[in-house]
Image (cartoon, rainbow, N blue to C red):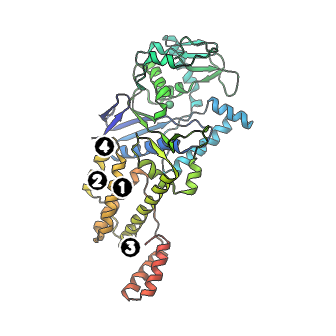
Amino acid sequence: MLKIYNSLTQNIEPFETIKPKRVSMYVCGPTVYGDIHLGNARPVIFFDVLKRYLSYIGYDVLFVSNITDVDDKIIDKAKEEGVLEKEITDRYFKRFVEMTHAVGSSLPDMMPKATEYVSQMIVYIQDLIDQGYAYARPSGVYFRVGKVSDYGILSKQNVDELSQGVRINLEDDKEDPRDFSLWKTTDEGLRYTSPWGEGRPGWHTECAVMNHEIFGGEIDIHGGGTDLKFPHHENEIAQTCAHDHHHIARYWMHVGRLDVNDTKMSKSLGNITWVKDLIQAYDALAFRFLMVGHHYRMPINYSDDLMQQFSKEYDKIKRSLKKAFLTVSLNKAFTVEIDEEHRDTFLGWMNDDLNIPNVITLIYDLLKAMNKEKDVFRLAVLYQTTKTIMDILGIMPRFELTDDTINLYKAWEQARTDKDFVRADQLRVKLSERGWM
Ligand SMILES: [Zn+2]
């Protein structure tokens, strides 16, 4: 049985869904005002693997990931370029989709945009005001943190200590410095009419409302990067506790950080690597291999050396697979049969809180077994087993065998049979140049 680490309880727990054999999953998506960097790509890759695995073990998964297309950063960027916000958000949404595909992920089943849910957000905020959980001020509407006894449940923060850490802004007209914004009144940039004046919704409200609208109740998994735990996820939970009396999801899953040479990747430090640049220099699947090669909850300390190391390893894996693919193809030995023992080991590691690093070790074992295997049908089974596993991780390379290559290979075999070693050697070089030897 699948067990996963639940950030809400800080325990590894058996995965029991609300509805049998169905999984509802929501993952916080990007604010579309810039390209995606390596850190942004980590949840895009991990939750794609999680969905593939859940589907493999028989769940029907509905995977929703939102797009934040109304935000101060978007407005600033639009101003900077002298264009409308929509031009910015359309452009970077498109880039996000391209990069999602580039790193080998499928798109989520639904990608709701915040701007499509503004009227529902207004109704939701009004509900919170009516129930005494929120209040309007000239600067906007705020959530009354002190009224939710579970506040701090996810980030394990002490609410009283929290208030001491919050910098008090003299211009703020909030009752309590911990209170967070549900609606920001403004006369600048993209804005909407509301009972509290023109303005735009707060980010934490966007996710709480889209969850509420799309799923209509508690879901199985809510995910995101670990940096979103506080304040974003804590504030999503606070609103849902007030509005619907649950914690949004049974299981909260957080993906670890990606640092660069031991420091946080950030614009201000100038150490950002964009996915679009990285995949010019490396096979995008080698990058995905690096990402899944680290346990999803652990931080990754990224460096060029680390990328090169994983790239070399991935090339080796590709070569081994290609060799096996060639033998299986030439002998027309393809099968759908997979090796049960290895499959069980795979399930065991995945069910243990998605222990993908150990699955990678299993892949190496399978490659070793393939390299030694003399029986072509047994080789085909091992190949199919490896392919099944690597497809779930999204790191299986695609091979195409042309007639030309088949002819070269046959000629090479013939030359060896004829003991024409000079010709065999020439043919071997040609095959090797194409990566088939
Ligand atoms: Zn969110």
Q: Dot 2, crowdedness within 10 Å: few (<14), some or many (≥20)?
A: some
Amino acid identity at mark 2? Arg
The residue pinned by badge 3 equals 330
Location of the N terminus (image quadrant): top left
Q: Does residue 176 show up?
A: yes
Query: Local crowd at mark 1 within 10 Å, few (<14), some, or many (≥20)?
Result: some
Of the residues under marks 3 and 2, which one precedes in the sequence?
A: 3
Mark 2–mark 1 Cα distance, whole angstroms, equals 9 Å
Q: In the rendered image, which residue does mark 1 sit on?
A: 388
Report whether residue 407 is seen.
Answer: no
Label whose residue precedes the other's in the sequence (2 or 4): 2
For mark 2, what is the residue? Answer: 343
Q: Which of marks 1 and 3 is nearer the N terminus?
A: 3
Residue 141 pos. (x, y %):
58, 16
N-term mark: 2 or 1: 2
Between 52 and 226, which is closer to the camera in this rendering?
A: 226
